[in-house]
Structures are given as C-alpha cells and as structure tokens.
Amino acid sequence: MRRMVPAAILAGILAGTLAAKAQIRVAAAADLQPVLPPILAQFEQATGVQAEATYQASAMLTTEIENGAPFDVFLSADLSYPKRLIDAGVADAAGSADSTTPITYAMGTLVLWERKNAHLPPPSLELLRSAALQRLAIANPDRAPYGRAAIATLRNLKLYDALKPRLVTAENIAQTAQFADSGNADAGLISLTSALTPRLRAEGTYFVIPRELYPPIAQGAVIVSSTKQRPAVHKLLDFLLSPAVQAELARSGLTPAR
C-alpha cells in the first residue's frame, strides 16, 4: 500500500518549494555588470530569493519599463531616470524617507583607462590633451550617465571641440570598456567598476578623473509599481544597503551610499 503524506507536511514541502522558486527581475545599469552577479548570488543564498538581472544603459531600461517590461526593480546609474519613472507613476521608492525620491545605493566614479601596450603617455588629463590620442571611447551621453559625465569632463577641460571628431561612442559603459580593451579606441572614459575587473586590471592602467570635473554620479533604485514581488524587492534593497554589501561595492569601484 502507498503511504499517504500528511497534509500538513505536504503543505510545508510545497510552501518551501514555492519560496525557493521566488524570483525578482532586476533592470540593472551596465556599470553594475562586473559587480552585481556575486552580490545577487549571496542574496539568493541568504534569502532563498532568486534575482535575475538584465544589464543595459539606464535610458534603455527606463524606456523598457515605461513600455511595460516585466521588471520588479530598477538599479540605475543615476537618479534622473528612476525619478522620471516615479514622475510617470510607474515606479516608487516606497520604504524610503521620501517615496518620490529614488533610493541612492552607491556613487559612481569616472576613470580614463588605456591598454598597457597602447604606446601612449600614461593615463592622465595630459593624455586627453595629447595629439597622440586618436580615438577616445565614451558611452552614449543620451543614454548613459557615465557618457554625460565624460562629456562634462571634456567640456570643463575645454577639450570637447578638439576631441569631438575623435570620440568613439558606445551604447553603454560596458561596451565603452570593450572598445578600449579591444583596440577599437586608444583609451576610454569608463567606470571604475569596469577598470577594476580582472581583465582590465591586468591589461591596462587607469587614472581617476577628478570629481569636480563632472556632476556626481549618484546611482538610484526604484521599485516598479506593477511588481508582484514587493516584499522580495524590499529584501534586495535592504541587502544592497547593508554594511557588508556596501563594503563589497566599495571594493568593486562604487563609493558606498552610507
């Protein structure tokens, strides 16, 4: 005879299975691609909640969310795009002191990176002034906050007009790093998160652009209003803001938000 599983035990097994399969979809700025995967793995291990990330330029993710893409949370590379979603009524920062203001989870840093075999002067502001620099990769300033920071830097240095014909524009900051790494550009204005990846650290060197040359890159998070996973999203945001994860973000090139 087949043994019957008591209803209470069966319900517990089913509940545990459902909890293990809980999943949230994360729209993540491209500068997080080198940083976020191990953090999401730690989050799943700690909570049992799976978090699957899609990495693109912040502007592209904003448009997708506005058009109904099924994301649960948006981790942008700036505050303007999540604020746009809040103003449009499709996202919120519920749980923060002000639900109309995105939650700042980190601050980004812009660097000038070049390959060790580029046969150029070391990365510095002087390199940007050098005639030897023929191709400079930047992210699309219309779509990527790091691209706007790059343009602001060049304008503040009064180099934009001279360098404009030499700019190689990438879709997002991850692609900008690829352009510089592959030789499609002599150097690139990229995120510190990209420069600190094992490959770029081994293949090149970087110079931290002085922060007074570009507006702060405050990276903001919002909850997509249509999410059915709000409690799990709050867990993820709390996890991102925890001291241990903020310290990990700092090691990966993002200045902690707190």
Image (cartoon, rainbow, N blue to C red):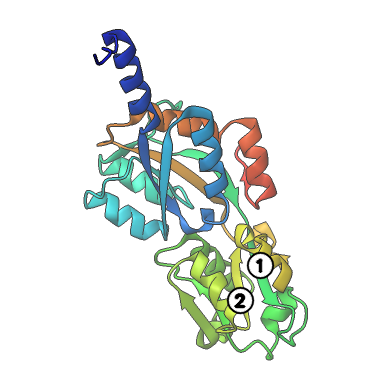
Image spot of residue 221 (x, y percent): 44, 41
- The answer to whether residue 123 is above or below residue 232 is below
Please state which of residues 226 and 109 is positioned toward the viewer in this rendering: 226
Q: CA distance from mark 2 to mark 1?
A: 9 Å
Image quadrant containing the C terminus: top right
Kindly check if marks 2 and 1 are in contact, taking CB atoms under 8 A apart as contact: yes
Say the numbered circle drawn on residue 25. Answer: none
Q: Is 77 positioned to the left or the right of 60 in the image?
A: right
Q: Is 9 positioned to the left or the right of 2 in the image?
A: right
**Pointer 2 or 1: first along the chain:** 2
Local SS, label 2? helix
- The answer to whether residue 99 is above or below residue 32 is above
The furthest residue to the right: 122
Nearer the viewer's eye, disc 2 or disc 1?
Answer: 1
Image spot of residue 141 (x, y percent): 45, 68
Image quadrant containing the N terminus: top left
Question: Residue drawn at (70%, 73%), measured in percent from left and top?
Answer: 203
Please state which of residues 103 and 227 is positioned toward the viewer in this rendering: 227
Can residue 205 be seen? no
The furthest residue to the front: 1
Question: Residue drawn at (77%, 78%), measured in percent from left and top?
Answer: 122
Q: Is 90 positioned to the left or the right of 210 in the image?
A: left
What amino acid is found at the position of numbered circle 2 in the picture? Asp
Please state which of residues 13 and 149 is positioned toward the viewer in this rendering: 13
Q: Which residue is mark 2?
A: 181
Q: Which residue is mark 1?
A: 199
What amino acid is found at the position of numbered circle 1 in the picture? Arg
- The answer to whether residue 130 is above or below residue 98 is below
Please state which of residues 233 and 84 is positioned toward the viewer in this rendering: 233
The picture quadrant where one finds residue 183 is: bottom right
Label 1, residues with CA under 10 Å away: few <14, some 14-19, many ≥20: few
